[in-house]
Image (cartoon, helix red, strand yellow):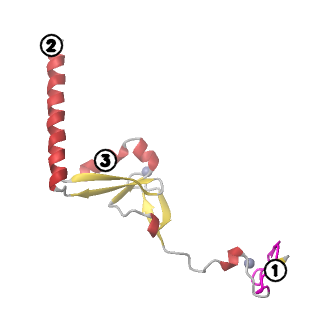
Amino acid sequence: MIGCSKCGKKKKVQRLPASRTTWKCSACRKPLTPPAKAEVQCFICANSVFLRESKINKSDYYICGPCCKHGRHRLLDNLRPEGFILVHKMNAAAGYTGFDIREPSDEEWASVQRAKRILELELQQYREGRSNV
Ligand SMILES: [Zn+2]
Ligand SMILES: [Zn+2]
C-alpha cells in the first residue's frame, strides 16, 4: 500500500517505488495546466466540444453529426460564393465534419463542370421522359 504524498489517496502496489515518500497518485501527477484545447462549434446548432488542437483538422466551419444527418450542412452552400467549392472533411474533429469554402483548383473546376454537364443532361432526359407520358 502506498499513499499519495499530495492528496493522501491510498493505492495498492505490487512493489513500493523508490520514491515512495514523494509518490503521487495519477490524478495529482497530471500537469496543472492541461494541453491547450480548442472549441469546435457546430455552425448550425451551436453545440460545441473541446478538443486538443492536434485532434482537430482545421476547417472554416464545423457541423455536428446530427446536423449532418439531417442534411443541414447544405445551408453552407448558401455561403459559397459563385465558383467556389465546399470541401467536406469527414471527422475533422471528433464527430464533427469540417467544411472549407475555397476556390477550386483547375482540376476540381473541370470536374465540377463535367458533373454539371452530366446533371444537365440527366435533367433534360428526365423532363423529356415526363413530357412523353
Ligand atoms: Zn493524489
Ligand atoms: Zn449541430
Give the magenta part as a residue range.
Answer: 3-20
Q: Which residue is mark 2?
A: 132
Q: Is residue 3 left or right of residue 61?
A: right
When asked about the image quadrant of residue 125, the answer is top left
In x, y percent, where is residue 79? 25, 53
Whether residue 36 is visible:
yes
Query: Marks 3/2: CA distance?
Result: 35 Å
Q: Amino acid at mark 3?
A: Leu
Tag 2 secondary structure = helix
When asked about the image quadrant of residue 19, the answer is bottom right
Q: Which residue is mark 3?
A: 75
12 inside magenta stretch: yes
Tag 3 secondary structure = helix
**1 or 3: tag closer to the N-terminus:** 1
The label shown at residue 16 is: 1
When asked about the image quadrant of residue 53, the answer is bottom left
